[in-house]
C-alpha cells in the first residue's frame, strides 16, 4: 500500500550545495503540501562531463543538513549524459519512489507551460526526428538545431528553450509524459534567483552565487561561507583539502589516449565521426585539460559534449556497456536519509520496483559495476579521498 506522505522530487548535483539550493527547498516547503523532499543526486561524475568538486558522501551530508529528507544516487550511466538521457534516468528513479511533485530551477515558465510543451513534443517525436536528421551534416550544436526547428514547426511553442535550465526542465517534463506520470506528478518550476547558473562572480551584496563561481572561489582559496547554508558549510570545510578538478585526472586520461589505438577508442561510448583521430593527435602536446579542450573543440562539438566523451574515455565506458545500462531500469542506491526520509522509505518499500541498494557487497556489486569503477577512479584524483562504495553505508542524519 502506498504511503499517505506527499513527496517532492528534485534532480540535483549539489556541486556544491549552496544558498540557491536552500532557496529551492524553502520554496517547496512554503508552497507545496509535502511531507518529504527527495533528491536524486549525481554521484562523483556530473552532467557536464566533469568530476564533482567533492565526493558524493560530503554532498549528501550538505543536502541533509539543509533540509533534504532522502538522497539517492543517479547512476553514472545517466549522470554523465546529455539532457534527455540524464532526465530519463532521474525520472525513472523518482517515479519509482512515488513522488507527487517535481521541482526544478528555470529562467522562466510555469508548470503548465512545461507540461503542454512536453505533450506537443512527445506527440510529434517522429516528425521532429525526421526533420532533425537533415541537420546531421551541418556544423550546428543540437540545442541550436532544435531551436530553429521549433521556430519552423511551432511558432507559438509555449516555452523558451534558450537557457540550459529551461532545456533541462523541459527534458524532465518530456520524461514525465513519456513515462506516463503526467497525472501523478505535478510540476513546480522555480525561477532562478539573483544570478545565472554560470555567473562566474561572487557578488558581495547577494548571498546567492552560482555553483560555478563558488567552485572557482574554492580553488582560488577565497571565502565562500556567505554563499552556503551555515548548517552545510562545515561538511564542505572538512573536505576542502579533498577537492578535485579535471586537471587532477588529466594524467590518467593522457595515459589512456596514449595507450589505446584508434580502433580501440572507437569502442568508447559516443566516439563518433573520427573523433578518436582528433583526440590522439591533440593529446601529444597538451599539458593541461584546458589546453587539450581548446585544441579539440569545434562549432559542432561543444566543450561539454567533449568533456562527456573524455569522461567515458577516462572511465573506459564502452558503447555496449552504456547502452545496456540505459536500456535497463536504474538501480536505486541509497546515499542518505533523516527520520522523515526513513519513514517514507519504510512505508513505500513494497511499491519500489527497481533494485533498491543500501550497501554494496558481493551480492549487489554487479548491479553497480559502473558506479563502483567510477568511484575507484574518482579516488585517484586526490590521495585523501576515501573509498567511495565498498565499506560505505548510507548516512543517517538526525
Image (cartoon, rainbow, N blue to C red):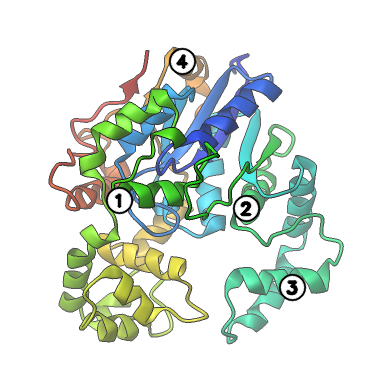
Mark 4–mark 2 Cα distance, whole angstroms, equals 30 Å
Marked residue nearer the N-terminal end (1 or 2): 2
The structure residue drawn at horizontal position 40% and vertical position 57%, both measured from the top left corner, is 324
> Which one is in front, 50 or 231?
231
Tell us which disc is closer to us: 3 or 4. 3
Vertical placement of residue 212 versus 35, above or below: below
Q: Is residue 267 visible?
A: no
> Which one is in front, 79 or 129?
79
Mark 3–mark 1 Cα distance, whole angstroms, equals 40 Å
The tag on residue 171 is 2
Tell us which disc is closer to us: 1 or 2. 1
Mark 4 residue crowding within 10 angstroms, few (<14) / some (14–19) / many (20+): few
Marked residue nearer the N-terminal end (3 or 4): 3
Mark 2 residue crowding within 10 angstroms, few (<14) / some (14–19) / many (20+): many
According to the picture, the residue beneath numbered tag 4 turns out to be 346
Q: Is residue 365 left or right of residue 76?
A: left
Q: Is residue 155 left or right of residue 186?
A: right
Amino acid at each position: 500500500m502506498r504511503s499517505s506522505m506527499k513527496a517532492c522530487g528534485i534532480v540535483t548535483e549539489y556541486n556544491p550545495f549552496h544558498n540557491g539550493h536552500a532557496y529551492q527547498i524553502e520554496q517547496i516547503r512554503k508552497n507545496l503540501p509535502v511531507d518529504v523532499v527527495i533528491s536524486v543526486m549525481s554521484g562523483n561524475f556530473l552532467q557536464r562531463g566533469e568530476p564533482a568538486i567533492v565526493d558524493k558522501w560530503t554532498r549528501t551530508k550538505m543536502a541533509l543538513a539543509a533540509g533534504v529528507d532522502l538522497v539517492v544516487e543517479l547512476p553514472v550511466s545517466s549522470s554523465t549524459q546529455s539532457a534527455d538521457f540524464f532526465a530519463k534516468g532521474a525520472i525513472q528513479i523518482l517515479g519509482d519512489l512515488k513522488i507527487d511533485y517535481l521541482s526544478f530551477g528555470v529562467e522562466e515558465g510555469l508548470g503548465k507551460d512545461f507540461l503542454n510543451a512536453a505533450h506537443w513534443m512527445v506527440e510529434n517525436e517522429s516528425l521532429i526526428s525526421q526533420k532533425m536528421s537533415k541537420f546531421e551534416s551541418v556544423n550546428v550544436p543540437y540545442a541550436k538545431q532544435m531551436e530553429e526547428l521549433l521556430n519552423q514547426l511551432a511558432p507559438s511553442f509555449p516555452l523558451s528553450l534558450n537557457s540550459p535550465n529551461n532545456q533541462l526542465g523541459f527534458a524532465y517534463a518530456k520524461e514525465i509524459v513519456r513515462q506516463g506520470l503526467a497525472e501523478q506528478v505535478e510540476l513546480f518550476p522555480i525561477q532562478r534567483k539573483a544570478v545565472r547558473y554560470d555567473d562566474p562572480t561572487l557578488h558581495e551584496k547577494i548571498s546567492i552565487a552560482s555553483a560555478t563561481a563558488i567552485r572557482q572561489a574554492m580553488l582560488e582559496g577565497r571565502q565562500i561561507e556567505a554563499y552556503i547554508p551555515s548548517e552545510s558549510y562545515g561538511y564542505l570545510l572538512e573536505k576542502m583539502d579533498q577537492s578535485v578538478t579535471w586537471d587532477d585526472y588529466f594524467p590518467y586520461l593522457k595515459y589512456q589516449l596514449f595507450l589505446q589505438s584508434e580502433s580501440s577508442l572507437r569502442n568508447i561510448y559516443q566516439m563518433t565521426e573520427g573523433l578518436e583521430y582528433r583526440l590522439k593527435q591533440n593529446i601529444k602536446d597538451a599539458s593541461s585539460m584546458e589546453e587539450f579542450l581548446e585544441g579539440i573543440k569545434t562549432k559542432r562539438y561543444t566543450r561539454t559534449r567533449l568533456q562527456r566523451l573524455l569522461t567515458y574515455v577516462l572511465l573506459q565506458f564502452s558503447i555496449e556497456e552504456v547502452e545496456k545500462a540505459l536500456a535497463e531500469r536504474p538501480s536505486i542506491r541509497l546515499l542518505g536519509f533523516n527520520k522523515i526520509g526513513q519513514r517514507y522509505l519504510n512505508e513505500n518499500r513494497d511499491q519500489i520496483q527497481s533494485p533498491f541498494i543500501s550497501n554494496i557487497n558481493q551480492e549487489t556489486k554487479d548491479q553497480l559495476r559502473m558506479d563502483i569503477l567510477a568511484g575507484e577512479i574518482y579516488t585517484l584524483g586526490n590521495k585523501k579521498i576515501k573509498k567511495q562504495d565498498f565499506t560505505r553505508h548510507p548516512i543517517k542524519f538526525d
